[in-house]
Amino acid sequence: MTATDLATGSTGTAGEHALEAAGLRRRFPHPGGDVDVLRGVDLTVAAGELVTVAGRSGSGKSTLLAVLSGFDTGDAGSVRIVGEPVTADVPWQRCALLPQALGLVQELTAGENVALPLRLTDVPAAAVQARTTELLEALFVDGLADRYPPELSFGQQQRVALARALAPRPAVLIADEPTAHLDAGTAPAVLSQLRAHADQGGAVLVATHDDAVHALADRRLDLAHGVVARASLPR
Ligand code: ADP
Ligand code: MG
C-alpha cells in the first residue's frame, strides 16, 4: 500500500466517504515570493472514522482545514461533503468547522453560541435546550452558559466552540487544534467527545500536535511541503 492509498483510505469504496478532497492547491502571495502552502492534497475520511493531520507549525494544517470546510475556496482541487461539492454556506449539519481562532459570536452567551446552529434549523426549542445543556455539561462548561466569550478563558471558549460544532451532529466535523489550550482536567472530555462523534457515525478530521489525539485516531496523515507526506497504517 502506498502513502497515497493510505491518505485516501483506498481500501474502501469512494461512495462511503463523508469527506473527499482531491488535488487541493493553495498559494498565498508574499512580497518575498509566493508561498505554495497546499501543492496537491488528496484525502478522504469515511463516516465513523477519526483521522488526524500532523505537521509542523506553518505546514498548512489550518489552510487545509479551511479549504476542506468551504471557509476558503483554495486555488484548485475539489472537496465533496457527503457526495456534494462544499460551498461557503455548507449547512452545519453537513460540515462543522471548529477553527483555531474559535469564531464564537462575541455578542452571544456561551449557551446561545451552542444553540445557534440548531436555531438556524427547525429543531423545537425544547430539543435545542436539551442538546445545548447536554453538550455544555459533557464539556464541563455548564456553569458558564450565561457568560459572554470575553468573560471566559481561552480553554473554556475552546470547549464552548466544540460544543457548538457538535450541536447539530454534523456528518463531517473538522477541528483545528481542539486541545491546544486545555489542561489535564478538561482534555479527556474533549478527546472523548471527538471519538464519540466518530463512533456515532460522524467523519472527524482533526489537525493537532497532541499525541493524545493521535492515539485516538483510526489514521494519521502527515502534512509536509504542501502534500500528505506520510500516512500511518490504520490501527
Ligand atoms: P499551520 O496551521 O500548519 O500552522 P497555516 O495553514 O496556518 O499552518 O499556514 C501555512 C502557511 O501559510 C504559513 O506560511 C502562513 O504564514 C501562510 N498563510 C496562512 N494564511 C495566510 C494568509 N491568509 N495570507 C498569507 N499567508 C498565509
Ligand atoms: Mg494552524
Image (spheres, rainbow, N blue to C red):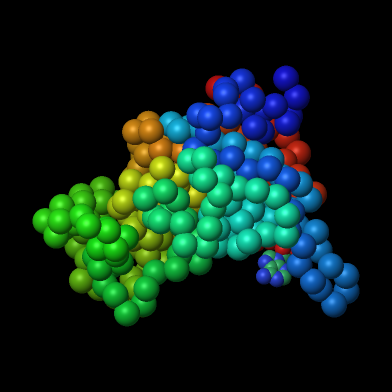
Nearer to me, 202 or 85? 85
Residue under the image location 25 percent in, 68 percent down: 112
The picture places residue 114, in percent across and down from the top left corner, at 29, 61
> As displayed, is residue 102 above or below residue 213?
below
Residue at left offset 61%, top offset 28%: 9
| Furthest-right residue in this view | 32
Residue 121, compared with residue 33, is above or below; it is: above
164 to the left or right of 174: left
Q: Is residue 134 visible?
A: yes
Residue beneath the point at 67% across and 28% down: 6
Examine the rendered structure and indicate whether residue 115 appears above or below residue 17.
below
Q: Residue at x 73, y 31 (%)?
A: 4
Residue 211 picture quarter:
top right
Q: Specify whether residue 137 is in view.
A: no
Q: In the visual, does 204 lie left or right of 55? A: left
The quarter of the rendering in which ligand 1 is drawn is bottom right
Q: Residue 108 location, x and y as percent? A: 29, 75
Q: Quarter of the image containing the C terminus?
A: top right
Residue 77 at x, y percent in the picture: 70, 50
Residue 123 in the image: state x and y as whole percent.
20, 55
Q: Is residue 18 left or right of residue 138?
A: right
Q: Residue furthest front?
A: 84
Q: Quadrant of the N terminus?
A: top right
* Residue 31, picture quadrant: bottom right
